[in-house]
Amino acid sequence: MSGVTLASLTNQKLDAARRFIQQSQDTDEVWLKVGLESSAIFQLRSALNGLLREVASAYSLAGTLDVAQLFAESEGKQIVVPALAELADLLSRPDSWCFQLNQAYLVQFECRMSMSSGVKSDSLIGRGSDAGASVSFYLAKLVELVLRFREESSEY
């Protein structure tokens, strides 16, 4: 894996998410839509972890994937990291895309109950409720954040 940068790994995760979202929107099979959207959510959460690794590397922070810990460490070192401040704020607000992405991840991959579950009482399999729109929104917002971080860190 020599020559592979943290940024390229993050980019690969973002691209995989984009492809899963596109495939989910191109199919008429409900069961496949749900699976592809779940895969996209996993890739988006992995891309967020990739961004956190990029931040940690760029600012010589610990290798943790916990936003609160990275933010606290950056404050302790008196380093201003706008991406971490934004992520900490987003994760504290239930109406933010980042908080909702994390909740979607927990619902899909840790078998947690959804606060707004699309599963009906007699249905065994939940259905995607918005044709991938929210997952596409998470992708767009995460890409914006990654690009802003990279621009800011190149100035740092």
Image (cartoon, grey):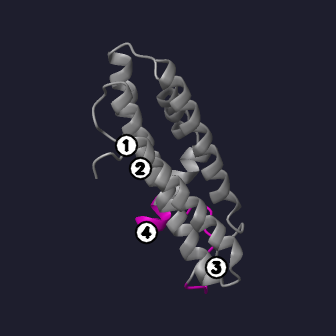
Residue 105 location (% of width, % of height): 48, 59
* Real-space CA distance between mark 4 and mark 3, rounded to the nearest whole angstrom: 16 Å
Q: Residues within 10 Å of mark 4 (few under 14, many from 20)?
A: few
Q: Nearer the viewer, mark 3 or mark 1?
A: 1
Left or right, 131 with respect to 86, comes to: right
Mark 4, secondary structure of its residue: loop
- Which residue type does callout 3 highlight? Lys
* Real-space CA distance between mark 3 and mark 2, rounded to the nearest whole angstrom: 38 Å
Reply yes or no: does residue 118 show up in magenta.
Answer: yes
Q: Nearer the viewer, residue 97 or 53?
A: 53
Would you say the magenta stretch is mainly helix, strand or loop? loop
Q: Nearer the viewer, residue 46 or 99?
A: 46
Label 1, on which residue? 5
Residue at the far front: name it: 3
Q: Is 74 placed above or below 34 here?
A: above
Label 3, on which residue? 120
Residue 125 location (% of width, % of height): 56, 82
Asked whether the beta carbons under mark 3 and mark 1 sit within 8 Å of each other, the answer is no
* Real-space CA distance between mark 4 and mark 1, rounded to the nearest whole angstrom: 32 Å
In the rendered structure, which segment of residues is drawn in magenta? 106-124
Q: Which mark is residue 111?
A: 4
The answer to which quarter of the image holds residue 62 is top left
Left or right, 65 with respect to 39, comes to: left
Q: Residues within 10 Å of mark 2 (few under 14, many from 20)?
A: some
Residue 129 location (% of width, % of height): 69, 70
Residue at the far top: name it: 78
- Which residue type does callout 2 highlight? Leu
Label 2, on which residue? 9
